[in-house]
Amino acid sequence: MSSEVSNNFEQDAVLRASIDRSLRHPVMFFLTSGAAWLAVSIILGVISSAKVHSPGFLDGCGWLTYGRTQAAHLNALIYGWGFQAAFGVIVWMLSRLSRQECRASGIILTAGHLWNLGVSVGIFGILAGYGTGMQWMEFPSFCWPVLLLSYFAIVVWSLVQFKVRPEGHVYISQWYLMAAMIWFPWVFITANVLLHMMPGNPVMAAGINAWYKSSLIFLFFTPVALGTAFYLVPKVSGRPIYSYSLAQFGFWTLAVIMPWAGMQKLTGAPIPYFIPYLGAAATIMFFLPAFSAAVNILRTAIADPEVANNSPTLRFTMAGIIGLIVMAAAAVFLNIPGKTLEFVQFSMSGYGFEILSIYGFFSFVMFGAIYFIVPRVTRREWLSRRLIKWHFFPSVYGVAIIALIAIFGGIQQGIGQEEFEQSWSEVAKRAVPYAWAITIVWCFILFSNFFFFMHLTVMWLRLGRRSTHPTMLVSGHHGSPHGDDGDIDNCGPGTVSAH
Amino acid sequence: MSSPNPHSKPDLDETINVTQAHARVASEFSAATREKHLAESGRESVPLWVITACGAVLLIAGGVLGNAGTLFSYDNTFRANYVRGTAPGSAVDGPQPKTALMAFSAKGSKIYSAKCNGCHGADGKGDGVNYPSLVGSTFVIEENQKLAMVILNGIQGPVSNGKTYGAGIMPAQGAGMTPEDLAGVMTYVRNNFGNSTGDVVSVEMAKSALDVSAAREKAGQSVTSEEILAKHKVILSGADISPEIMVNPATLAPVE
Amino acid sequence: MSFRTFILSLSASFGVAWLAIVIVPYFKMRSLEPIAVEEGDGTNAVYIPKRAGRIADGAEVYAANGCYQCHSQLVRPTYAGNDMFRPDMGGIAGDEERGDTRRETNAFDFQGEKFAQIGVSRLGPDLSNLGRRIEAIYAKGANPETWLYGHLYNPRWTPDRRESSCPSFRFLFKVTEIKGNPSEESLPFPVEAGMEIIPKSAARALVSYLLSLKKDQPVPTSLNFAPSAAAAPKAP
C-alpha cells in the first residue's frame, strides 16, 4: 500500500474525526436529552394505556387524566425524542457529508436547550390543563414560535455547510435530509398559523390538523430515517447502494405523493368530498417509496450478512427497515374505503400505525445511528454488548406486538362500532383486552429503554471503553491478539499497542 | 521499535516513524478509520417483483381514487347524488320496531319516572306509611278501569288493601296525559315491580278510559275505594292489542 | 441534479398539494355561503343553526381535558359508515314529538367553535347529539345538568355503566361546606355531613357546552338526504 494513498485515507479519517469532535456537545446533548424524553413518553404511555382498561388507576387528579396523559405521551415522543434524535443525526450527518467541521456548535447547543425548554413548557402545559385539543399540536399556543425559532437555529448551519461543500456528487442521504429540513417548517408554519392565527371553518381546521400529523410522519420522520439508513448501511458494510435509480425513484415518489395524504382521517366529514379519498389513495401509495427504499437498503445490507448480524448499527437499522415494510403494508391495508377505512377511522388502529411509524421505523433507525455516531463523537466504544442486546430485543418484540395488536384491535373495535344494533357498552368492551396487552408491552419497552438511557448517559460522560475495536453483538472471535475486547488503551493517546 | 515518549505528540506531517503515525491514527481515530466509503454506484436493475408489487398497489390506489368522485370539486361536501341508505335488515325508516309489551312499557317507564316514582318509589313499593305499594295491589292488577280511574283522578281515603296511607290523598295525575301516555304507564305498572299481568293496555282502551273519567258523576274530584269497587270494576272497552305484536316505539302504532 | 433543480422540484411537488388540499379549501370554507331555506309560508330564511350555551368556554375545557381522545363528534353519511343506523347517534330515531330526527353532520354544525373536535377514537360514544340524548333518554323527566354533572363526577355510578372507562372528572368539582341551604347544583353523591359537592366553573362551562350538542335540527333541502318524500319534521 503506497504511503500516499494511506496518507490520504488517514487524512480523511482525521478530517472525519475532527468533524465528529466539533459536534460532540450538541450531538450528545440531543441524543441524551432525546433518550430521556423517550423514557418520559413511554412512562406516560404506560399510564395512559392503563387508564383505558382500569379507569380508576391514578384517577381523580387532573394532571393525570387520560385525555392529558395521552396527549403528553405522544407530544413527548414526537417533539422530545423524535425531533431531538433527528436533530442530532441531521447536524452530524450533513456535517460529515459536507466535509465541514461545525463552527456553530455553541449556537446549536443553545438552540437545543431552547427547544427542550419549549417542549418542557409544552408538556407541563398539557398536563396542567392548557392543551389546545389539536392532535400533535396540543402544546399551548405560545410554544410553537419558540420551537420554530430553535429549529431554524439548529438546522440553518447544515444548509450553510451544504452550500460551501466541496465539489462532487450529492449523496442520496443529503437529498432526503435537506428535503426533510425544508418540508417540516413549511408544514409546521402552515398548520400553526392557520389553526392558531387565522380561524376558519372548524371542520376544515380539523382536516389541516390531520394533514399535519400525516406530513410529520411521511415528510419529516420518514425522510430523516431513510437518509440515515442510506448512510449507515454502506458505511458499515462497505457495499455500495444496491440500485441508484431505485433510490432516486424512492425519493421522488415520496416527494410527489405524500403531501396529498392525511385527510382520510376525516372520511365522511363535511369537507370537500374528494379530499379524504385522495388522502387515502396517497397513503396507500406510500408503499411505493417505502418498499423501494426498503428493498434497496436491505439488499445492500445482506450482501454481507455477517457484518449485518454483528453490528449493532446494522441490526437496529435493519429492524427499522423491516418496520418500514410493515408500515407500508399497514398503510395499504388500513386505507381501503368500504373495507377498512371507515372501520378503523375511530379506533386504536391509528395509534398503532403512529407507533409503528415513529417507533417501529423511525426510532429503530435512529437507534442504529446512535450506536454509530456516539463512539465517533465521544471517542469511546459502547461499554457492554449485553446492554445493547437488552435494548434491542424487548424493543423489537415490543413494538411489533404493539403495532399488530393495536391495528388488529382497531379492526375489532370497528366491527363492533358498525354493529349498530349493539349497545355502546358492548362495543366499548371490545377494546379492553387489547388495552391490557398494550400496557404490558409498553412496560417491556420501558425496561429496554432504561438500559439504553443508562448506556447512553455513561457514554455521554465518556466512561465508555477506550478501544480500537467496536462493540459487536457477537462475542469477538478468532485470533485477535488483543483479546476479545480489543485494545484497552490506558496510557493516553500516542501509546502504541504491543504486537 | 522504541516506545515513544508519552509526552510528545508527533505531528502527522513531520513524523519520521510512519508506523507510529499509523498506529496513532489507528488507535485515536479508530472509529473513523474503520468506516467504509460511501458509494452509490450500485447499478443493479430494479427487480421485477418490486415493480409488480408496486404496480399492484397502484391499482389499489387507483380504485380508491375512483371513490373520490369529481376531483377538485370544492363545493360538494357530500357525495354527489347521495341518498341516505336504509339500515340493512330493516324495512322501516325510523325507530326499530319492538313488541307491544316492550314498547308500551318503555314509554310508561318514562312517565313513571317523571310522575310516580317520587312517591311510590323506583321499585313501586312505596314506603309503607305514606305511599302505598303497587306490587300486587288489586287496583293495579285486576280489571284495568280501576287503575285508570286512580291514575287520572287520584284517590282519597283507604286504598285496595283497606289501609289509609299518609293524609289519605293521592293527587290526580291525568292533567296533560295523552292516551298513549296513559296506556304506557298502565302497561308499565301492570308488568313491572313483580306484577306480571302479561297484557297491554291499548291506546284505544286508554281513550275510552279518558271518556269514562270525564263522564263520571264526580268528574274532576278524586275517586274513592267505594266508587272504584262499585262502578269501575270492569275492563276498558276498545280493541286490545296483543303483547307480542311489533309496534313502532315512537307512535305505538303496529307496523306492517 | 443541481441544488436549484432540487429546490424547484421540491417546491412544485409540495406546493401543488399544499395549495390544492390545504390552502384553497381552507380559505373557501372560511366564508361559507349561507343556505337559503324556504319556509312553508313562502318567506325566505337562511339556515343558521343556533347553539345555546357557553360554547367557546366549554369547548376549551373539552379540548384541554382530552375528551376528543375517546369521543368523536361526527355522524357520517351512510356511504362512510353505519352511524346513521344507530338509534341515538345522529339524533333520536323515535322522538315522541318529532319522529326520526337523525341526520348527518354538516359544515355548519360547529358554530361557535374554532376547531371541530372530530375525535381520535370511539372508546366512548359519539357526542354530536349528547344534549339531545341526555334530555330524551338518560335524564328524561329529570334535570339534564344534574345527570351530566353526576356522570362527570363518577361515570361508573349507575348499574348500567359499571364498566365505563370514562375517567372521573371529580377534579372539576369541589367539596365545600354547606352555607345555609344546600346549593341547587350540589351533586347527590355521598359526602361528609355538612359538606356538599358543587361544580367549579370549568365543569359548568363543560356541561353547558355538552348540553348544547344537539345536531339534529331540520336542515334545508340541499342538506336533507332522507330517502322518503316526506320532508323532515317541521322546525320547532
Image: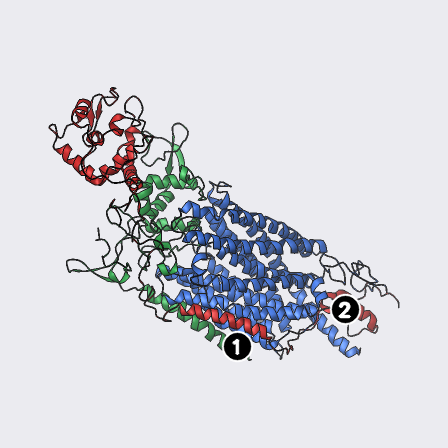
| The furthest residue to the right | B1
* Amino acid type assigned to the residue bearing label 1 in the image: Phe
Disc 2 to disc 1, C-alpha distance: 38 Å
- Residue C166's place in the image compared with A92, above or below, is above
Classify residue A364 as left or right of residue A129: right
**Judging from the image, what secondary structure is the residue with disc 1 in?**
helix
Q: Name the residue under label 2.
A: B25
Is residue A463 among the parts visible in the rendering? no
Q: Position of residue B215 (x, y in %)?
A: 11, 32
Q: Residue at x 25, y 28 (%)?
A: B142
Q: Name the colour scheme.
A: by chain
Classify residue B76 as left or right of residue A470: left
B13 or B23, nearer to the observer: B23
- Residue C91's place in the image compared with B128, above or below, is below
| Chain holding disc 2 | B
Q: Where is residue B74 in the image (x, y as percent from the top left)?
A: 34, 68
Query: Which mark is nearer the camera, 2 or 1?
Result: 1
* Amino acid type assigned to the residue bearing label 2 in the image: Val
Which chain does the red colour mark? Answer: B
Classify mark 2: residues with Cα within 10 Å, few (<14), some (14-19) or many (20+): many
* Rendering colour (chain C): green
**Judging from the image, what secondary structure is the residue with disc 2 in?**
helix
Q: Mark 1 points at which residue?
A: C6
Classify residue B70 as left or right of residue A409: left
* Rendering colour (chain A): blue
Q: Position of residue A53 (x, y in %)?
A: 50, 44
